[in-house]
Image (cartoon, rainbow, N blue to C red):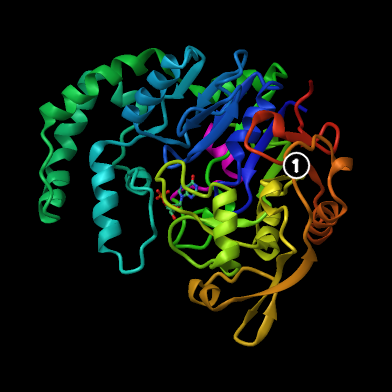
């Protein structure tokens, strides 16, 4: 096996960055294939916390090359900021490669995001990073690719073509129009930084794969935020699923081998949209505080709820997870009981699937099974056998319901607080 894919199984924020970092020591290449700086991947080691939004979470592993592939939408100024931040912390970004086919987020995309979000009655709760408008431009065949952005004259010509229409839209929305001169000036230093980093990453990933090198694909967001299979329209504008790996990298689907679904031991969601197992009150506040459930990108408090196995079954089917990784298990310690949503009640009938109709999904009520809680602390536990029996029962309950083994458990934010239960669960050879 030479590839391994990490995917969020819920509504994002499951701990994918932390697990990618944990696996990266086994990888020769780490690849982000969708999304942009709406992602916020937190990695903690040696007493320091690092927050990444664009650069793959393999960056802290010296030997891996880190690829921002063509399926991403990239804000060059955010990338510049992230590279500068890493540099200041003593991390080299010489091993970062950016796809020439990735689409570029420009300042007006963020303005469009805000204008459109304000115009919506039901807020999606976007991160405001311009992700949706950049993907929309791509689909409308109005977008700007990296190859064009880094070429001064080509970018100038792109602005000549598009800026008038953009400014008409901005003026109608009461915003200050943008000038070509200001955009060119703003672009200049980041174009210079990007030029040596931009290349055909489809060929690069393919070459690594052909040579049998080990490739880790790092998903952002989560399956329930998938544009196609998530809780539309309360979703992001890309597909954060395993199916997006080949398309977002420009490689064959055959390349996808093991797929690790990252599952938070409970559920969180930021932004709008239904969330059947959402809870409020004291228990919710306790989970929110202990789990530090505040957005890495926006700082917003995340909504919290019990584990939802109906939504997870949806993610298992779509992604073909070969194993699950249960994160933040320590957050559930010391509760007398733990609830798990195993079905929904929709208009008086029991269902065990996620309805396509968002209004039907809003009417779904959770049907819970109640399990015994477990006593902590478990944050120092480093192997399965040392977990309390009730925690093991919780893990087994999830496995038997979903038909996928839990291969890895995480009991704290630090790199050292993750352990594999199943040997070789990560497809990459040591
Ligand atoms: P957008 O991706 O900024 O357009 O936001 C669309 C929806 O996806 C909003 O509900 C966001 O809160 C959510 N979202 C986007 N990125 C992430 C993420 O990395 N983690 C969790 N939620 C996200």
Q: Let me know if residue 11 appears in the view.
A: no
Residue 133 on image: x %, y %: 32, 47
- Give the residue at mark 1: 409
Q: Is residue 10 above or below residue 32?
A: below
Q: Let me know if residue 123 appears in the view.
A: yes
Residue beneath the point at 15% across and 51% down: 169
Q: Is residue 128 above or below residue 96?
A: below
State yes or no: residue 343 in magenta. no
In screen coordinates, is 246 left or right of 396?
Answer: left
Q: Is residue 138 above or below residue 196?
A: below
Q: Is residue 8 above or below residue 390?
A: above
Residue 353 on image: x %, y %: 67, 69
Magenta part of the chain: 237-250
In screen coordinates, is 136 left or right of 287?
Answer: left
Residue 23 on image: x %, y %: 69, 28
In screen coordinates, is 247 left or right of 391?
Answer: left
Comparing 290 with 384, the one in front is 290
The quadrant of the image that shows the N terminus is top right
Comparing 129 with 230, the one in front is 129
Residue beneath the point at 51% across and 14% down: 95
The quadrant of the image that shows the C terminus is top right
């Amino acid at each position: 096996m030479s590839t391994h894919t990490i995917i969020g199984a819920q509504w994002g924020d499951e701990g994918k960055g932390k697990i990618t970092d944990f696996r990266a020591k086994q990888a020769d290449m780490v690849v982000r294939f969708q999304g942009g700086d709406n992602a916020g991947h937190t990695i903690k080691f040696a007493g320091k916390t690092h927050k990444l939004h664009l650069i793959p979470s393999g960056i802290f592993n010296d030997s891996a090359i880190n690829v921002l592939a063509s399926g991403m939408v990239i804000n060059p100024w955010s990338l510049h900021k992230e590279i500068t931040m890493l540099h200041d912390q003593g991390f080299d970004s010489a091993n970062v490669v950016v796809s020439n086919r990735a689409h570029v987020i420009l300042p007006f995309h963020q303005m469009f995001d805000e204008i459109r979000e304000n115009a919506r009655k039901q807020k999606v709760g976007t991160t405001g990073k311009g992700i949706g408008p950049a993907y929309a431009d791509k689909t409308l065949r109005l977008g700007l690719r990296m190859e064009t952005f880094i070429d001064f004259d080509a970018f100038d010509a792109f602005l000549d073509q598009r800026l008038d229409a953009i400014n008409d839209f901005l003026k109608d929305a009461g915003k200050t129009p943008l000038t070509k001169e200001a955009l060119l000036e703003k672009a200049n230093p980041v174009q210079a930084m990007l030029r040596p980093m931009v290349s055909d990453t489809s060929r690069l990933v393919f070459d690594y794969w052909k040579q049998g090198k080990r490739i880790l694909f790092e998903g952002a967001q989560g399956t329930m935020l998938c544009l196609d299979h998530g809780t539309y329209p309360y979703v992001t504008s890309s597909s954060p699923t395993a199916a997006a790996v080949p398309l977002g990298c420009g490689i064959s689907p055959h390349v996808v081998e093991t797929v690790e679904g990252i599952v938070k031991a409970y559920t969180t969601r930021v932004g709008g949209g239904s969330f059947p197992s959402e809870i409020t009150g004291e228990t919710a506040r306790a989970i929110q505080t202990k789990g530090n459930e505040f957005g890495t990108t926006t700082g917003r408090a995340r909504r919290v709820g019990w584990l939802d196995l109906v939504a997870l079954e949806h993610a298992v089917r779509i992604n073909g997870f070969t194993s699950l990784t249960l994160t933040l298990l320590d957050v559930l310690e010391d509760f007398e009981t733990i609830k798990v949503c195993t079905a929904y009640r929709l208009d008086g009938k029991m269902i065990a699937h996620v309805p396509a109709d968002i209004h039907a999904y809003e009417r779904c009520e959770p049907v819970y099974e109640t399990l015994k809680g477990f006593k902590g602390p478990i944050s120092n536990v480093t192997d399965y056998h040392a977990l309390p029996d009730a925690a093991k029962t919780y893990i087994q309950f999830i496995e038997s319901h979903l038909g996928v083994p839990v291969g890895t458990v995480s009991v704290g934010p630090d790199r050292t607080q993750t352990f594999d239960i199943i040997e070789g669960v990560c497809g990459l050879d040591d």
